[in-house]
C-alpha cells in the first residue's frame, strides 16, 4: 500500500445557499486552509476533518491500492493518472481536495487492538 498526498485546493462558501439556509455569520470551513497537505492511506490523517474524510476516503483507499495506475471512471473524469479531485459533503461550504498517488510505502504506525 502507498501513501496518498491530499492537498486542500480551495475552501468555498456558497453565499446564496448560506444566506437562505446558513446561520448568521457563516464563513468558509474553519477547519481546513488552502494549501494544507496531508498524507493518508488506511486511516484519517491527524488534524483532518472527520466529515471530509468520510467523503474522500474511498478515493484515498483506491489510490493507495494502485488505482493510480489507470484513470478513474474509464478516463472520462480526470486526465492525469493517479489523481482525483474530490470535495467534502458540506453543501454550504465545501472544501475541494486534490488526491495524488505517491510511491511512498505506507507503514502501520499503531498496534492493532485485538
Image (cartoon, rainbow, N blue to C red):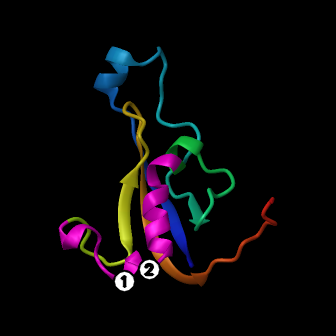
- As drawn, is 56 to the left or to the right of 104? left
User: Callout 2: 10 Å neighbours few (<14), some, many (20+)?
Assistant: some
| Residue that numbered label 2 is attached to | 66
Q: Residue at x 39, y 78 (%)?
A: 68
The location of residue 44, given as percent across then percent down, is: 62, 56
Task: Decide whether residue 70 is among the magenta residues.
Answer: yes
- Range covered by the magenta-colored residues: 54-76
Q: Which quadrant would residue 105 be assigned to in this image?
A: bottom right
Q: Residue furthest front?
A: 114
Q: Report helix, strand or loop for mark 1.
A: helix
| Residue that numbered label 1 is attached to | 69
The location of residue 94, given as percent across then percent down, is: 41, 40
Task: Decide whether residue 22 is among the magenta residues.
Answer: no
* Quadrant of the frame with the N terminus: bottom right
- As drawn, is 14 to the left or to the right of 23? left
- Above or below residue 5? Residue 113 is above
Q: Report helix, strand or loop for mark 2.
A: loop
Q: Residue at x 37, y 33 (%)?
A: 91
- Above or below residue 101? Residue 57 is above
Amino acid at each position: 500500500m502507498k501513501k496518498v498526498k491530499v492537498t486542500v485546493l480551495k475552501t468555498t462558501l456558497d453565499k446564496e445557499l448560506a444566506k437562505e439556509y446558513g446561520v448568521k455569520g457563516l464563513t468558509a470551513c474553519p477547519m481546513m486552509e488552502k494549501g494544507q497537505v496531508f498524507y493518508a492511506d488506511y486511516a484519517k490523517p491527524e488534524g483532518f476533518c472527520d466529515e471530509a474524510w468520510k467523503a474522500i476516503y474511498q478515493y484515498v483507499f483506491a489510490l493507495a491500492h494502485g488505482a493510480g495506475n489507470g484513470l478513474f471512471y474509464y478516463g472520462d473524469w480526470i486526465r492525469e493518472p493517479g489523481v482525483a479531485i474530490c470535495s467534502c459533503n458540506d453543501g454550504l461550504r465545501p472544501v475541494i481536495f486534490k488526491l495524488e498517488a505517491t510511491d511512498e510505502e505506507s507503514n502501520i504506525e499503531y498496534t492493532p487492538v485485538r
